[in-house]
Image (cartoon, grey):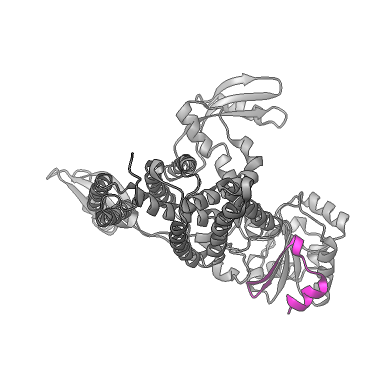
Amino acid sequence: MKQKATVGGKSFFFNVIFVVLNLVGLTFVVLGAQKQFESFYLLFSFIGFTTMAIAAAGLFIFSGRLMMSNISRVIVGSIFIVSGLVKANDPIGFSYKLEEYFEDGALAFRLKELFGAPGFSLEFLITSALTLSVIICIIEIVLGVLLIIGGKLKLVAWISVFMMAFFTFLTWHTANCNPEKKFKDRNTYSFSDGSAQMKLGEIKTNKSIHIVAKTSSTLVVDEMMTPQCVSDCGCFGDAMKGSIGRSLTPTESLWKDLVLMYLLLWIFLAQWITEPNTSRQNLVFVSFSVVFMTFFSWLFSWYFIVFFGFLLVIAALWMKRVGGVIFGNYYGSVVINSLMLISLTSYVLLYEPLKDYRPYAVGKNLWKQMNDGVEGKYESTFVLRNLKTGKKEVYSQKEYIEDENLWDTKKFKFLKGSQREIIPARLATVTEQFDPFLAVSDLTPSDLAFDEVVKQLKRNVKEGEDSVKEISLRSYVAHVDQIVILSVKRLSDANWNEISNYKAIAKACKKRSIPFIMITNAAPSDLKKFRKKYGMYIPIFLNDETELKAISRSNPCLLVVRHGIVTSKFAHRSTPDVHWFLKNSIK
């Protein structure tokens, strides 16, 4: 009879040492690959891989796979729950990231290259991005819970490895995307809008464009295009950027996935000797996972993560215990977790994220975030060959500029120049994309009744700047004593069930000399129709839709800004009546 595998294996003491060595070695490998430790790359890699190899051999010799698998289950399961909950808190934001990947020049270009299929496209998935966003979040969290409680580990191990393989490919693609590289793409142009005629004209001078098919209505061509590189994989949504000031870089995201994949491989290798958790094991696993999730809750300044994560685990165990014949198993655990997560995502889809990590969250200072960018600092070096000695010599930018002898082509031959980043540049949190504006030629009587518009027009005339074409409220919004903003990310599909409340609030604000404006992204003709349909004769300014999506997931959304600080924010379904609004949100 085969002996049952135990956590301690042949030696609990030695297996603990090998597990620790394995994790230490993994840490050295990861650190060595990071930019800040590039000078120690060879040393850290040697130490890391050697330690990991010795530890792995020891774990197999002393039958310590189960111990390593258990440690991995706690780490991976907790990260799955944390990562999934952060994205489930803002599934619309995650869907925007998926849409970026589904665009034709993003992830599809890599698959076009791999399979030699220029006509391949993922754009058909864009319309399903939100649904996929919710499904991915739920699967990730449920897998995390099952890893912790030891449910259906063989099936979970297979699914987790395949899922992680896909995400690792995704982050590898992101980290290695070259925006200057060309790839063959198949595009369709229409004769009705004139794009096909323009492309035919381009073909005459560009020999790299080849006609695949031509009909009376469309033109299909193969042409060389540049990829659309995604700068942020969205692994932790906006949580990391909103809490510690930046997201993981593409390279860091790749290494995060490689670490998870490595840990998952230990789970996969031990799946045949792993038994479902006992009650005592559940107590240990859940306790350690709570500690792990508490760390991330602290990091992301949101303790709902550990609270709801713990609730999910307890609910899964409870359902297995009391679910009876039908639900008294791990499938019942999946069902109750899925229902809890559907409830969570439904709520945030109807309203706003429970925790708002975006720059326009309540309490955020817009002016401060407009000016928190960092200008990068770089060091240039130049490599030249000394024609007299034949040796390569390296000079700093200052030395190269000040020493004219180095420019003498009879003495030196220029080989190459390079630039090293000393201080990385960072865009301001609120970029120039936030700029509510309106062309002077499009000003309506409602806009001309707005004091700030009149002031800017008069100031332009006074300063002799009659040629100014636009009115901008970027600085005004960040400095005015108080302003109420109705943010509408898309005018065409906005929910106007609360239009009577908006009109009442606008009227009350006007009576109290409080600016009330709307920001959206629409053509002047559409704004004219909107005003006429709803009788909403207020100043309306335009802004880039990408930034409007960041202001609010709700469409529309009401904000109050005082001295540049967002003090109130209401999704359209939670819009208060005018009396409550005046009493609680207006000074």
Q: Is residue 377 visible?
A: yes
Q: Position of residue 372 (x, y in %)?
A: 50, 67
Q: Is residue 131 magenta?
A: no
Q: Classify 505 as above or below 101.
A: below
Name the residue at 61% across, 44% down.
Answer: 132
Q: Nearer the viewer, residue 543 or 290?
A: 290
Q: Is residue 563 magenta?
A: yes
Q: Which residues are magenta?
A: 561-587
Image quadrant where one finds the C terminus? bottom right
Q: Position of residue 292 (x, y in %)?
A: 44, 62
Q: Position of residue 368 (x, y in %)?
A: 55, 71
Q: Is residue 229 left or right of residue 21?
A: right
Q: Nearer the viewer, residue 306 or 558?
A: 306
Q: Classify 75 as above or below 451.
A: above
Q: Classify 422 as above or below 108.
A: below
Q: Position of residue 202 (x, y in %)?
A: 57, 28
Displayed quadrant of residue 453? bottom right
Name the residue at 81% across, 59% down.
Answer: 444
Q: Identify the residue at the far front of this view.
A: 1
Q: Classify 456 as above or below 10.
A: below
Q: Nearer the viewer, residue 563 or 132?
A: 132
Q: Is residue 234 visible?
A: no
Q: Nearer the viewer, residue 298 or 239?
A: 298
